[in-house]
């Protein structure tokens, strides 16, 4: 099971939060730093606010797009 660290972008849904994960790496030829962002829907039982850093854990599908659970707040 995968674990990913990201930040909370939206808390408007009941028991669901949107987590944005930022991935950075250096291009092997041009040596430029490349940034990619991806958003995940995660099941949440914790009191979270916008901008909180969290760890999400992969789980069984809970709905069409929700396949992650919030483990803990960092």
Image: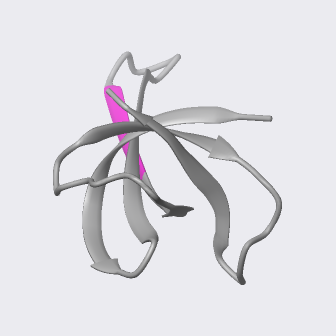
- Above or below: residue 59 compared with residue 43: above
Q: Position of residue 4 (x, y in %)?
A: 55, 35
Total marks in image: 0
Horizontal arrangement in the rendering, residue 19 relative to residue 58 (left or right): left
- Above or below: residue 6 compared with residue 45: above
Please tell me whether the stretch drawn in magenta is mainly helix, strand or loop: strand
Asked where in the image residue 43 lies, by quadrant, the reply is bottom right
Q: Position of residue 10 (x, y in %)?
A: 27, 69
In this rendered view, identify the residue nearer to me: 3 or 21: 3
Residue at point 40%, 55% (across, down): 19
Let me know if residue 40 is in the magenta part.
Answer: no
Let me know if residue 36 is in the magenta part.
Answer: yes
Asked where in the image residue 36 lies, by quadrant, the reply is top left
- Above or below: residue 62 compared with residue 7: below
Residue at point 37%, 16% (across, down): 31
- Above or below: residue 57 compared with residue 15: above
Horizontal arrangement in the rendering, residue 64 relative to residue 38 (left or right): right
Q: Which residues are magenta?
A: 33-37
Q: Position of residue 37 (x, y in %)?
A: 39, 51
Figure quadrant of the N terminus? top right
Coloring applied to the structure: one colour
Check the image and name the residue furthest to the left.
50
Horizontal arrangement in the rendering, residue 16 relative to residue 69 (left or right): left
In this rendered view, identify the residue nearer to me: 45 or 58: 45
Asked where in the image residue 26 lies, by quadrant, the reply is top left
Residue at point 17%, 48% (across, down): 51
Figure quadrant of the C terminus? top left
């Amino acid at each position: 099971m995968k674990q990913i660290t990201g930040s909370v972008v939206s808390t408007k849904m009941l028991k669901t939060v949107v987590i944005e994960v930022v991935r950075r790496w250096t291009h092997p030829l041009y040596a430029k730093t490349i940034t990619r962002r991806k958003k995940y829907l995660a099941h949440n039982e914790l009191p979270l606010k916008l901008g909180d850093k969290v760890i999400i854990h992969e789980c069984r599908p809970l709905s069409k797009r929700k396949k992650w659970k919030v483990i803990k707040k960092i």
